[in-house]
Image (cartoon, rainbow, N blue to C red):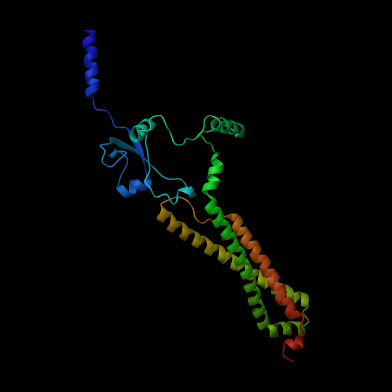
Amino acid sequence: MLLTAALLAAQLAAQAPVAPRTIAVDERLALDAGLSVGDRVIIAAEPDEAGDTVLIGAITRRGADPSEIARAEPRIRVHVGQLQQLLGYGDRVDRFAIATPGDAATAEALARINDAAFGFRAHRSADIAVETSETFRVVTRFHRAIGVITIVASAIFLLCILLLKVDERRRDVAALRLMGISRRTVMRMVVAEAAMIAVIGSGLGVAIGFGVSAAVNGYYQAHYRTPLEFSIVTADIVVLAGVLSLGLGIVAGALAAQRLVRTAPLALLGR
């Protein structure tokens, strides 16, 4: 009687439908193929194979990793056993990641893995990140060079504009000097005006920077379908822009005013 019940239970278990295993699908693939959570799909190692029916259990979004921008191939995440069956690798792996509690444990793990057998090579995740981000480091240096050139060119341009503007006010300065206003007061007025113009200009520049940054991020994030921010306006950049603008404005205003106040009032009037 017990044997019959056991055989019946085994037959029912064999006849019961096996629930498909779940996988996680990349957001790009889900958008391109019109997939959603709960859909049934067939995965196989080769296009002409029968494959296995699986259930989409989650849709993953790629992180803000610069090394993944150019990788347009679709991605799915499956269970390890299912991956072994699809690839036919058995108990082999190409690479794996190990989490360690500290630097000492990391160094020990590196030494033990590298000494385990010929062909094994362990690397720190930070070293891999540096190698994969080398292109972006070169681009950063290039942008820094462009920034320095732009600052120097803008300083020269600002000085030229202030020289022209101050030169146009020769008669006003001459009248102030004839009224008894000292050279130091005239210089302070010109420098204060130049500083105010520089601060207003830096504010407009920061506003334009935020607008351009938002436009750049909107376009490239949609193009590459990534949450990575390609352009960032930080507080440090805003402070640096304000300090540079104010400093260059004061220096340019002082140079322009000094050139003007050294001239005699009657000479400024053309006499």
The answer to which image quadrant residue 222 occupies is bottom left
Q: Quadrant of residue 157?
A: bottom right
Q: Where is residue 159 shown, x and y percent of the image?
A: 66, 74
The percent position of residue 259, horizontal first and vertical second, equals 73, 79
Residue 36 sits above or below residue 14 on the image: below
Residue beneath the point at 64% across and 76% down: 160
Residue at 31%, 43% in the rendered image: 36
**227 with respect to 35 (left or right):** right
- Residue 247: tell me if it is visible: yes
| Left or right: residue 148 compared with residue 10 | right
Q: Nearer the viewer, residue 211 or 122?
A: 122
Asked whether the viewer can see residue 233, the reply is no
* Residue at x-position 53% and y-position 45%: 129
Q: Residue furthest bottom?
A: 271
Name the image quarter holding residue 104: top right
Q: Is residue 14 above or below residue 242?
A: above
At 64% from the left edge and 68% from the top edge, which residue is drawn? 152
Instruction: Give the tally of numbered discs.
Output: 0
> Along the horizontal axis of the image, is 255 left or right of 105?
right
Q: Quick one: quadrant of the C terminus?
A: bottom right
Image coordinates of residue 25 in percent, x first then y, are 36, 41
Q: Position of residue 78 (x, y in %)?
A: 37, 36
The furthest residue to the front:
118
Q: Quick one: quadrant of the N terminus?
A: top left
